[in-house]
Image (cartoon, rainbow, N blue to C red):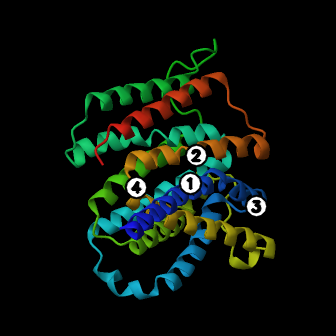
Amino acid sequence: MVNTVGSASKQNYLAIFGLLFGAMCWGIIWYPYRLMNDAGVSGIASSFYTYLIAIILGALLFAKHWRGALSLPKSAIWLCMIAGWTNLSYVLAVIDGEVMRVMLLFYLSPLWTLVLAHFWLKETISKAGFISIAIAMLGAYIMLADPFNSQSNFLPLPQNQSEWLALSAGIGFSFTNVITRKSVHLSLAAKCMLVWVGVAVMSLLFIPFLGLLDLNAHFPSPSFFSLNNWLIMGLIAILLMAATLFVQYGVTKITASRASVLFLFELVVAAIAAYYLANEAMMLNEWIGGGLIIAAGLLAAFNHQD
């Protein structure tokens, strides 16, 4: 009995570590992508190569699971494409946009998940759910419209391409969550590989639109990269793999409400990193709006049935 309790406690600590590690990775991973962008490699190109490295390493790591690759259900294709766009648009957003504004727009995802789960999974939205939606919308309005500024925009819309990408990434993340919830039959290895393949495929599909999505409209061949470039991309790939695996393990071992709280560590890491690495500081409206968005996410998480 003691051994069973000790084993469960150990798994719980490992799950918490996994979620915190994943949050830390996603809170800092924008910086090496910006380094690649400064070296003349677009976000689309660097995403393709980093996730290609992840796919190659993943294929070796999950070699014994490849037999069932051809028998995956149709939902796996949707998960692959939507998760691919989610990760790609997130990377493109944090390369050019203000890190914390991108993060906070992305963290509207609990709102979209609540709505999608209601219409797709037929889950009932509670009174607390409606309150969280209202709080999130108020937070987004304050952050985007900046009502404290006399020259503020009347319409609370994203102000640039990066913010639109961040918003779409949050919506994509919500779709990914709902599809994952319906795809309980998929293994950890399958989910991870589907995400990595999805980003690589989406990167290839958007090469013709490089000029619209990225200022560095250039897709380099492998010979373009220096050893330092490859080391940076290899580091990104390893971080992405570790974050994906740890997060997937974490969310299977602890409740969604606790996981949502731990994910907020990403915002703390991102705020510190953005301040010291990119000299970015948040304005008053962003602090207030961001606080409301976080509060809405917590309210939605704690009032959701796991």
Q: Residue at x 34, y 62 (%)?
A: 78
Residue type beneath disc 3: Gly
Residue farthest along the top direction in this orientation: 150
Tell me the quadrant of the picture where the N terminus can be found: bottom left
Q: Is residue 268 above or below residue 14?
A: above
Query: Which residue is nearer to you in this view: 174 or 21?
Result: 21
Marks 3,1: beta carbons within 8 A: no
Residue 156 visible in rendering: no
Label 3 neighbour load within 10 Å: few <14, some 14-19, many 20+? some
- Residue type at the position of mark 2: Phe
**Mark drawn on residue 265:** 2
Residues at marks 3 and 2, CA–CA distance in whole angstroms: 31 Å
Sequence-wise first label, 3 or 1: 1
Q: Secondary structure at mark 2?
A: helix
Q: Which mark is residue 20?
A: 1
Q: Position of residue 65 (x, y in %)?
A: 39, 84
Residue flagged by tag 4: what amino acid is it? Ile
The residue lying at 52 percent from left, 38 percent from top is 105
Callouts 1 and 2 close, C-beta under 8 Å? yes
Query: Which residue is at a point 67% across and 26% down the rendered structure image?
Result: 283
Q: Position of residue 224 (x, y in %)?
A: 75, 74
Cα distance, mark 3 to mark 4? 41 Å
Q: Which residue lies under the disc numbered 3?
A: 40
> Where is mark 4, residue-wise?
254
> Looking at the image, is mark 3 or mark 2 nearer the viewer?
2
Q: Nearer the viewer, mark 2 or mark 4?
A: 4
From the top left corner, tell me how far across and down residue 301 is, in percent: 38, 40
Q: Is residue 184 left or right of residue 211?
A: left
